[in-house]
Amino acid sequence: MLWAELFESALTGRSRKTHASTGIAGADEDIEHINEIGAAIRGEDGRLPKSVREIMQIGLIGGEPVDPTGHAYVIRSDGKAHFGEESLV
């Protein structure tokens, strides 16, 4: 935690913006990937997964992906991955 705080405090101006935009771009890729896996499950089983944890249990992802603020993604009733309520993104 201390190292993360030091890293964040070292980022200023342009580098902070670059770091933030890189994190959000990575999050968009994570969400897209989770949605692609959900679509594959739907094609196979005829239903969408109810949670990211379900995708983990099936073995299609190795660990629970988190957004740049360290919060897990959620799959809502629309069957799509979204940032969780606790997310700061």
Image: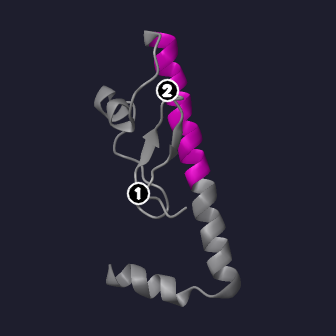
Q: Residues within 10 Å of mark 1 (few under 14, many from 20)?
A: some
Q: Amino acid at mark 1?
A: His
Residue 38 got which mark?
2
Q: Main secondary structure of the magenta part?
A: helix
The first of marks 2 and 1 along the sequence is 2
Which label belongs to residue 10?
none
Residue 9 in the image: above or below residue 53: below
Q: Position of residue 82 (x, y in %)?
A: 52, 44
The quarter in which the C terminus is drawn is: bottom right
Looking at the rendered structure, the secondary structure element under dot 2 is helix
Picture quadrant of residue 60: top left
Spatial CA span between label 2 and label 1: 20 Å
Which residue lies most toward the left here? 57
Is residue 34 depicted above or below 28 in this figure?
above
**Could you tell whether 61 is left or right of 31 in the image?**
left
Callout 2–callout 1 Cβ contact below 8 Å: no
Q: Which residue sits at x=47%, y=10%?
A: 46
Residue 11 falls in which quadrant of the image?
A: bottom right
Residue 23: x percent and y percent? 57, 62
Residue occupied by mark 1 = 71
Q: Magenta span covers which residues? A: 27-44
Name the residue at 50% across, 36% down. 34
Would you call the spot at circle 2 few (<14 residues within 10 Å), some (14-19), or many (20 or more)?
Answer: many
